[in-house]
Image (spheres, rainbow, N blue to C red):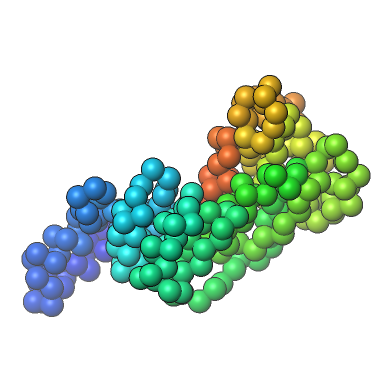
């Protein structure tokens, strides 16, 4: 409502045209193939995030530039290298993380909340999903501690980092195969845990379904689960928890 009052005041004072006011109040830009939500940050605290998979390089490029023009941060996920190159032609200071398959741009000062989120990966093969969570968290202003290759097949590796995990504000646990790591961590940590099943595994893993079901059926308390390979969703949820913890003080 405050934003609407400001726009109406500018129109009343002759400082903004009716056409421009209507464009601002509409809240999105129609590119023909996409309606880019420019009011997402007002509602959610972070701009619309581009899901690049299934879009052409030109479409990702145009959406990215539309968001960049209106805001100070732009994040795109599931970005292939050839798509990233198209965006880099117009946005040379964009950061492409090939492992995470993310594109991130900002012109805002890097500021971070106190504390950190621990991103815990069972194996090296789970790292691309873990890195997607890391990039998302950092874009949301969260510090991250990466704790990788600590799966249950060598559980002593997890115990060596347990103090660091227990001191985190939120823990994101990424695991494929049978997905047991989330239950183990859930039994050792008092902080919110967001479990991410990955599609890493042999045939009976069913593309991550076995890990998903293990995590959903965990007897450990405090474990929430996102969809298979959804590092972005886990990172975003963890970021919201951190944001609310520190901004409400």
Answer with the quarter of the image where residue 226 lies: top right
Residue under the image location 81 percent in, 46 percent down: 150
Residue in the foreground of this view, choosing between 62 and 155: 62
In x, y percent, where is residue 10? 16, 73
Total marks shown come to 0
Q: Residue furthest front?
A: 82
Query: Is the N terminus in the top left, top right, bottom left or bottom right quadrant?
Result: bottom left
Please state the horizontal and vertical placement of residue 74, each as a whole percent of the image: 42, 62
Residue 205 appears left or right of 107: right
Residue 36's place in the image compared with 193, above or below, is below
Q: Quadrant of the C terminus?
A: bottom right
The residue drawn where x is 38% and y is 62% is 86
State whether residue 212 is above or below residue 11: above
Q: Nearer the viewer, residue 231 or 245?
A: 231
Residues 115 and 62: in front is: 62
Q: Could you tell me which residue is drawn at 59 percent across and 68 percent down? A: 112
In the rendered image, residue 202, in percent from the top left (x then y), is placed at: 70, 28
**For the point 65% across and 63% down, which residue is it?**
143
Residue 53 in view (yes/no): yes
- Is 40 on the left-hand or right-hand side of 245? left
Residue 44 in the figure: left or right of residue 245: left
Tell me if I can see residue 243 in this picture: no
In the image, taking residue 89 as reference, residue 191 lies left or right, namely right
Q: Which residue appears farthest toward the top when viewing the image?
A: 204
Residue 12: image location, x then y, percent:
9, 72
């Amino acid at each position: 409502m405050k934003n609407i009052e400001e726009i109406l005041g500018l129109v009343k004072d002759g400082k903004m045209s009716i056409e421009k006011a209507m464009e601002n109040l509409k809240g999105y830009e129609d590119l023909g193939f996409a309606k880019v939500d420019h009011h997402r940050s007002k509602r959610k605290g972070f701009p619309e995030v581009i899901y690049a998979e299934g879009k052409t390089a030109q479409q990702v490029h145009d959406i990215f530039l539309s968001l960049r023009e209106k805001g100070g941060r732009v994040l795109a996920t599931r970005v292939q290298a050839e798509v990233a190159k198209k965006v880099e032609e117009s946005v040379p200071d964009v950061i492409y993380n090939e492992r995470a398959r993310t594109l991130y741009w900002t012109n805002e000062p890097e500021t971070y909340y106190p504390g950190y989120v621990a991103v815990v990966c069972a194996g090296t093969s789970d790292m691309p999903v873990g890195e997607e969570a890391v990039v998302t968290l950092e874009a949301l202003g969260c510090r991250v501690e990466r704790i990788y290759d600590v799966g249950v097949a060598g559980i002593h590796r997890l115990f060596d980092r347990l103090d660091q995990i227990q001191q985190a504000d939120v823990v994101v646990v990424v695991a494929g195969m049978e997905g047991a790591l989330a239950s183990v961590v859930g039994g050792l940590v008092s902080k919110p845990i967001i479990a991410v099943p990955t599609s890493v595994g042999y045939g009976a893993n069913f593309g991550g379904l076995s890990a998903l079901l293990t995590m959903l059926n965990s007897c450990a308390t405090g474990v929430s689960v996102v969809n298979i390979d959804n590092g972005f969703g886990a990172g975003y949820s963890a970021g919201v928890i951190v944001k609310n913890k520190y901004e409400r003080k």
